[in-house]
Image (cartoon, rainbow, N blue to C red):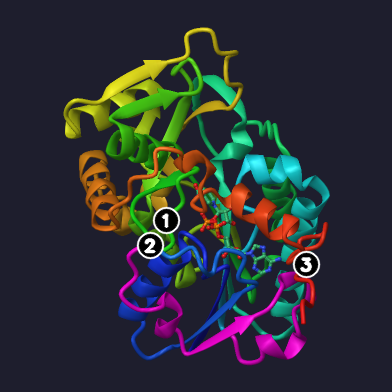
Amino acid sequence: MKILVTGNMGYIGPCVIQRLRTSYPDVTLVGLDTGYFANCLTNAEILPECRVDQQHFVDIRQIPKDLLDGVDAVVHLAGISNDPMGNTFEEVTLDINYRASIELAKKGKQKGVRSFVFASSCSMYGSADESPRDEKSPLNPLTAYAKSKVYTERDLENLADEKFKVTSLRFSTACGMSERLRLDLVLNDFVAGAVTSQKITILSDGTPWRPLINIHDMARAIDWAIARDISNGGPFVAVNVGSDVWNYQVKDLAHAVAEVIPGVEVSINKDAQPDKRSYRVNFGLFRKLVPDYQPQVDLITTIRDLKEGLEAMKFADENFRNSRFMRLKVLNDLRSKGFLNDNLEWVNTH
Ligand SMILES: NC(=O)c1ccc[n+]([C@@H]2O[C@H](COP(=O)([O-])OP(=O)(O)OC[C@H]3O[C@@H](n4cnc5c(N)ncnc54)[C@H](O)[C@@H]3O)[C@@H](O)[C@H]2O)c1
């Protein structure tokens, strides 16, 4: 068996590769990534890519067809991965996240890929304060990033059939320690603030709802999706991935961090405009389809892991919101130094 994991050199990727290496010791694991954040390593004992059998430095917008030869399953993580980047590079986000993703799926289907797992996002529910959203709820994507996920899911559904199984995992917001940590995610940001300056600054009024999931639990869900039996949900499944108890208001996350890390001061911006991106999510379908792969890591463990990880790095950058652990900052730097062009393609620099 051969599994291709795109976007394996990001935040979630290394954790997914470790999981798959363990659950499928004999498969050929192939990584594909353009490497935007390749040098943003954190505490990795080895280069995470040493765990794959082949690593391709390829842009998914220019994927050679033969790269899919003999591939049985694709785990598609590659993409512009948050709203700030999506807002800055709107058209590019649609190109990479939507158009190139669909091309990849089409090529994969032609080449006989049987299982396609897509990293979708609960952010497609947008503003939905009233009641937890389930998979039948109306979608309300507020940003280019969220729209790219909606369009991709829609077209993937049309491609899915008995021979080409598609599982779209609508992930909650990720958190947890990784070999390529991101600090532009809400819980990771709070822990970094607590560790570096004993302060958590909530940029909103703290009321938005945000479902969270630890990256290890995301990897578990991906593991399930690769081998999902087609009778369990049909050729196409879009499912919210997370757990009902991990629907938090942002201010509660901050207070949880302050409980684990004593002496931390939490400041809420009471004058902030309400953050429209607020949604609670219902994970009933995920429980029904996947009883054996439910999230296991709890919030306090995640906060402790992050704290220990940052301390092991001797991380002390109070100005971390302007550091290389912010994905948008890295892309902007690569552009301003002339390494990437406006379309976020590598420029030949020699
Ligand atoms: N982190 C979250 O909270 C979260 C939540 C829901 C869904 N997701 C989705 O999961 C996936 C992975 O997220 P992440 O947090 O690891 O993001 P990340 O930004 O850390 O990693 C994304 C990877 O994709 C690669 N990539 C981007 N454009 C590419 C291209 N054109 N060709 C090849 N590679 C390209 C990048 O180099 C990077 O290594 C994304 O699709 C994201 O939208 C993430």
334, above or below 58, in the image:
above
Amino acid found under the numbered disc labelled 3: Glu
Left or right: 200 as drawn, with respect to 3: left
94, above or below 160, in the image:
above
Q: Earlier in the sequence, mark 2 or mark 1?
A: 2
Can residue 44 be found in the magenta stretch? yes
| Real-space CA distance between mark 2 and mark 1, rounded to the nearest whole angstrom | 6 Å
In the rendered image, which quarter contains the C terminus?
bottom right
Q: Magenta segment, which residues? A: 42-71
Where's ligand 1: which quadrant?
bottom right
Left or right: 47 as drawn, with respect to 98: left
Circle 3 residue: 345
Asked whether 277 or 188 is in front, the reply is 188
- In terms of secondary structure, where does tag 3 sit? loop
Q: Earlier in the sequence, mark 1 or mark 3?
A: 1
Asked whether 94 or 169 is in front, the reply is 94
**Quadrant in which residue 90 is drawn:** top right
Residue pictured at 45% horizontal, 46% vertical: 183
Left or right: 208 as drawn, with respect to 24: right
The answer to the question of whether label 2 and label 1 lie on touching residues, with beta carbons closer than 8 A, is: yes
**Quadrant in which residue 77 is drawn:** bottom right
Residue density around tag 1, few if under 14, some if 14–19, many if 20 or more, within 10 Å: many
Asked whether 342 or 322 is in front, the reply is 322
Circle 2 residue: 42
Q: Earlier in the sequence, mark 2 or mark 3?
A: 2
Circle 1 residue: 181
Amino acid found under the numbered disc labelled 1: Leu
- In terms of secondary structure, where does tag 2 sit? loop
